[in-house]
Image: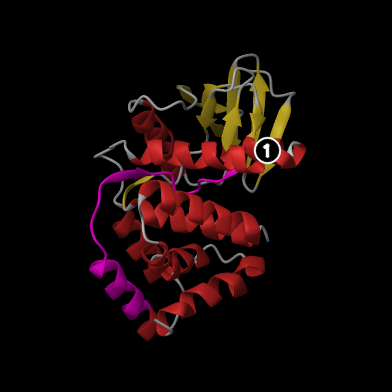
C-alpha cells in the first residue's frame, strides 16, 4: 500500500489515503487489543446499515498494525460550519438528526456503556469518596441498549458532494443510554470553547427527542470523570468542574 498521502496525524497514529482505501496506521507500541477492538466495533456498527466507512482489512504494514477502510471523499461537518457560518443552524440540525438515527440502532455485542464508565472512573485518581458517589450515580441511571458513538462531534461527520453524511471513528462505540452520548458531545463543544454552539446543540437535541435537559446534564459529572482518565492536563480543570457538580445537586 502507498503511504505517501497523509490526511491526518493523531497521537499514536496516522491516517493515509491510497486510492479508495483509507489506512489508519498505528504506532508499534499501540495496544493490539485496542486496535482489534476498534476494528470489531466498526464491523458491528457497519452491520446496522448506518452510513459508515466499510472495513476492508486489518493488517500489518512495516511491522505496524493498520485498519483499512473505505475512503469517503467529502468535507467534515466542522469545516462546513467554518466555511458557511450562515448555515450553522441547518448543519447543526442535520448533525442532531443523524445522532438520533444512530440511537435507533442496536448492537448487542458492543461493550455496555455503564461498564466502560465504571471501569474508567475506577482508573482515575479522584478521591475514593467521589469515585464511590459517581459509581452510585451510574447504578441509579436507567438502563438502555441504544448505540452510542462515544465521540460524536462534527469533525467525525463527513458530508459527500451529494449531501450524504457518513460517521467516522467508532473506536469508542458502546451500547447504553443515549443521554450519556449527548452529554459527551455537549462537553466536546465546551472543551473547544464553542459555548454558544454547545447550548444550541443541547436545546435542539432535547427539543427533537423529548429529552429533559436536566436529565442529560445529570450524566455530565459521570462522562467528565470517565474522560479525565486520559490525563490531558489542558482539559483536566474543565472536566473536574463538571465532576464536582455532583456535590451541587
Say which quarter of the image contains residue 49: top left
Residue for badge 1: 87
List x then y, in percent, for residue 19: 65, 14
Q: How is the image coloured?
A: secondary structure
Q: Residue at x 68, y 38 (%)?
A: 87
List x then y, in percent, for residue 90: 60, 38
Nearer to us in this view, 249 or 123:
249
| Residue sticking out furthest to the top | 19
* Left or right: residue 9 compared with residue 144: right
Q: In the structure shown, which secondary structural element does the residue marked by tag 1 occupy? A: helix
Does residue 212 lie above or below 168 as drawn? Answer: below
Nearer to us in this view, 244 or 18:
244
* Left or right: residue 2 compared with residue 238: right
Asked if residue 41 shows in the view, the reply is yes
Range shown magenta = 131-154
List x then y, in percent, for residue 185: 51, 53
* Left or right: residue 207 compared with residue 18: left
Q: Residue at x 24, y 39 (%)?
A: 108
* Residue 208 on the magenta span: no
> Crowding at label 1, few (<14), some or many (≥20) Cα neighbours within 10 Å?
few
* Residue 133 on the magenta span: yes
Say which quarter of the image contains residue 25: top right
Nearer to us in this view, 118 or 216:
216
* Left or right: residue 72 compared with residue 58: right
List x then y, in percent, for residue 174: 35, 46
Q: How many marks?
A: 1
Asked if residue 125 shows in the view, the reply is no
- Quarter of the image with the N terminus is top right
Amino acid at each position: 500500500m502507498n503511504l505517501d498521502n497523509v490526511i491526518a496525524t493523531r497521537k499514536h497514529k496516522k491516517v493515509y489515503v491510497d486510492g479508495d482505501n483509507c489506512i489508519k496506521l498505528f504506532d508499534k507500541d499501540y495496544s493490539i487489543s485496542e486496535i482489534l477492538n476498534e476494528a470489531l466495533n466498526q464491523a458491528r456498527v457497519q452491520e446496522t446499515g448506518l452510513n459508515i466507512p466499510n472495513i476492508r482489512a486489518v493488517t500489518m504494514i512495516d511491522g505496524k498494525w493498520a485498519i483499512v477502510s473505505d475512503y469517503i471523499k467529502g468535507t467534515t461537518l466542522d469545516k462546513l460550519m467554518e466555511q458557511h457560518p450562515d448555515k450553522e443552524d441547518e448543519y447543526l440540525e442535520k448533525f442532531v438528526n443523524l445522532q438520533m438515527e444512530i440511537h435507533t440502532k442496536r448492537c448487542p455485542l458492543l461493550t455496555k456503556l455503564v461498564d466502560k464508565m465504571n471501569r474508567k472512573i475506577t482508573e482515575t485518581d479522584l478521591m475514593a469518596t467521589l469515585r464511590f458517589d459517581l459509581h452510585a450515580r451510574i447504578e441509579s441511571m436507567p438502563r438502555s441498549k441504544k448505540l452510542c458513538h462515544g465521540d460524536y462531534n462534527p469533525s467525525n461527520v463527513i458530508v459527500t458532494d451529494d449531501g450524504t453524511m457518513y460517521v467516522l471513528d467508532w473506536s469508542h462505540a458502546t451500547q447504553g443510554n443515549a443521554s450519556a452520548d449527548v452529554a459527551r458531545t455537549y462537553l466536546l463543544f465546551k472543551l473547544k470553547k464553542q459555548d454558544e454552539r454547545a447550548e444550541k446543540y443541547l436545546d435542539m437535541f432535547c427539543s427533537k427527542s423529548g429529552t429533559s435537559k436536566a436529565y442529560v446534564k445529570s450524566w455530565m459529572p459521570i462522562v467528565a470523570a470517565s474522560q479525565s482518565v486520559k490525563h490531558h492536563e489542558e482539559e483536566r480543570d474543565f472536566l473536574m468542574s463538571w465532576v464536582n457538580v455532583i456535590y451541587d445537586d
